[in-house]
Image (cartoon, rainbow, N blue to C red):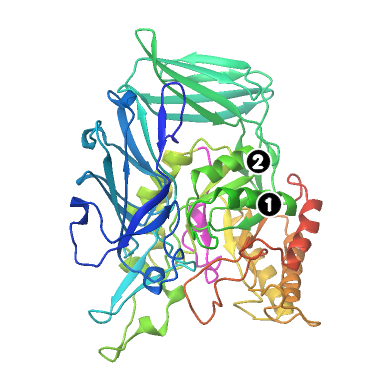
Amino acid sequence: MLYPQRNKTREIIELDGIWNFKLDDGQENRLYENPLTDTMMMPVPASYNDIYDDPKIHHHIGGAWYERSVYLPESWSDKRIVLRFGAVTHHAKVWINGQLALEHSGGYTPFEADVSNFLDKDYNNRITVWVDNRLDFTSVPMGKMFQVTEDIKWLKYYFDFYNYAGINRPVVMYCTDQLFIEDVNITTEVEKNNGYVDYVIDTKASDVRLLVKDMEGKLVAKGSGLKGRLSIENVKLWQPLNAYLYTCVVEVYHEEQLIDAYEESFGVRSVEVLNDQFLINGKPFYFKGFGKHEDSDIVGRGYNEALNIRDFSLLKWIGANSFRTSHYPYAEEILKMADREGIVVIGESPAVGLNMNLFQTKDETFDYINLKPIKYPSVWEVAECQDNHIKVMEEMIKRDKNHPSIVMWCVANEPASDDKGAYEYFKPIVNFTRSLDPSRPITIVEYNGALPMTSEVTKLVDVVCLNRYYGWYLATGKLDLAEILLSKELDGWYQMHKKPIIITEYGVDTLHGNTDTIAKLWTEEFQEAYLNLYHKVFDSKKFLIGEHVWNFADFATAEGITRVDGNKKGIFTRNRKPKKAAYLLKDRWHKIDSFYYK
């Protein structure tokens, strides 16, 4: 799916700003038939949960309504008009002037539709959006509704971050000619000093022309047709922390008249997993960075351009070269920043927490209404989300395929990979992912309970990614024991599977400003001691090719007795103030080169 673009053939109306908003009362009222009444103001993009000081909004489960109006310019009268949402969490229905125009499930990928037939091109047009934050065993991620009484309901979600909801990413309306460019697919290869660009253009037009320009605007290649290969002599490679981007200008003509155009930036680089190494442009790369979240005060998971630029500044300050989009595809604009800044990205799907046993509570294992215990089967016996899992992989890859910053796809985070049925669940998803994009490696992040001999999914992936918390959740506070357990387990994974390993999560909850003369739990000194221990083990393992600390910054979670105002494992606070450990990492990572470290 192409990112919206304003150029000489395409125009955009940005629909961000203040929308009318109200919560759904659960009565299935047909509120889209008439303008909403009794509304409040709500910013878009933003999560609605923390805008107002109202627990009914913060804890709301179910639907909510957004509405605004838009006038169309007269120049659009004969155009194809598309309404596009960057992301709505988790389900959306959209009406235009009271008519259902589009709907979508999945809270982290864009959706759009040609809405020309729903619009009144002479008058104001009313756009009404119904969003629903509920999850079930068919959704990705999964959740479960508990309806205790008619008035008391509770949504259990199987992931450890807050279930922010709303229109979280930008909304636009754009126009094209009726004969238009539907998609641009670019893959690259490197051979000596030459770069090769393979392209496929999706369009019903027959006269398609391409120009490739360098960053100075100089023409370096040109071609024509729906698909082909272009060669760039003396190519400049896209490198980690040293990005170089080319622009592919695609133009569609009809009777020698330009009717549509699109410019897609791309980088020329190669990616390969070979033996114990992850190669970028033929050189062994070492991942330094974080798991992150789209999370900040007030706007929640809403797209925040200033904050994102601040985060990239901190990534470079601390010496990071990469991050994982834990635990869902991030906004397209973030990936564009990564392309430009040379930050390497592991693109992850929203299939997080496919392991109900991880976060089971007494509320789930005992039926307090009927006073009897509840026994859950394996997650793979009850999960009904495989079809939607495949769907989100397709949507993510189609959206992000041309980003040079993305070097690997992560199919899931912390699934029950050691439960019977995991292989049967993941094999078709991994195969489908490879068929869509054979150019990038694939991984599945293992949870803390999976072992080298019990995981059923390791054979499917190219790189072993592990989340490990020895010294925190296991062997709590006992760092000498944690060192032995971590080292022994890493050796076991490599000896059994002979694949390179990235530690995609390691960290401890740390209260900013909580210090002591002894490295006690929750102190900044313990966070430093914990990181030093892990780094000592990492440096002794040649097959370990990366370290991603959990987490970049403190973030919001559901309330719980182990979560005091959210997850505090951040190296930075939620408002991006550094903890002591930030300086430890800064010193370490600036001394470790991105290439040839191991």
Q: Which residues are magenta?
A: 439-461
Pick whichever, 537 or 75, lies toward us: 75
Point out residue 396 in the picture as x, y percentages from the top left corner.
43, 45
Q: CA distance from mark 2 to mark 1?
A: 10 Å
Q: For mark 2, does the 10 Å Cα neighbourhood hold few (<14), some (14 to 19), or many (20 or more) residues?
A: many
Q: Is residue 517 magenta?
A: no
Marks 2 and 1: CB-CB under 8 Å? yes
Give the label on residue 341, or none. 2
Pick whichever, 125 or 195, lies toward us: 125
Which amino acid type is shown beneath numbered disc 1? Leu
Point out residue 542 in the picture as x, y percentages from the top left corner.
73, 55
Q: Is residue 316 left or right of residue 157?
A: right
Could you say whether the residue bearing mark 1 is in a helix, strand or loop?
A: helix
6 vs 166: above or below: above
Q: Quadrant of residue 535?
A: bottom right
Q: Which residue is mark 1?
A: 315
Q: Is residue 516 left or right of residue 390?
A: right
Asked whether residue 540 appears in the rendered view, the answer is no
Give the label on residue 129, or none. none
User: In the displayed image of the protein, which residue is found farthest to the bottom?
Assistant: 371
Point out residue 528 in the picture as x, y percentages from the top left corner.
75, 70
Q: For mark 1, does the 10 Å Cα neighbourhood hold few (<14), some (14 to 19), or many (20 or more) residues?
A: many
Which amino acid type is shown beneath numbered disc 2? Glu
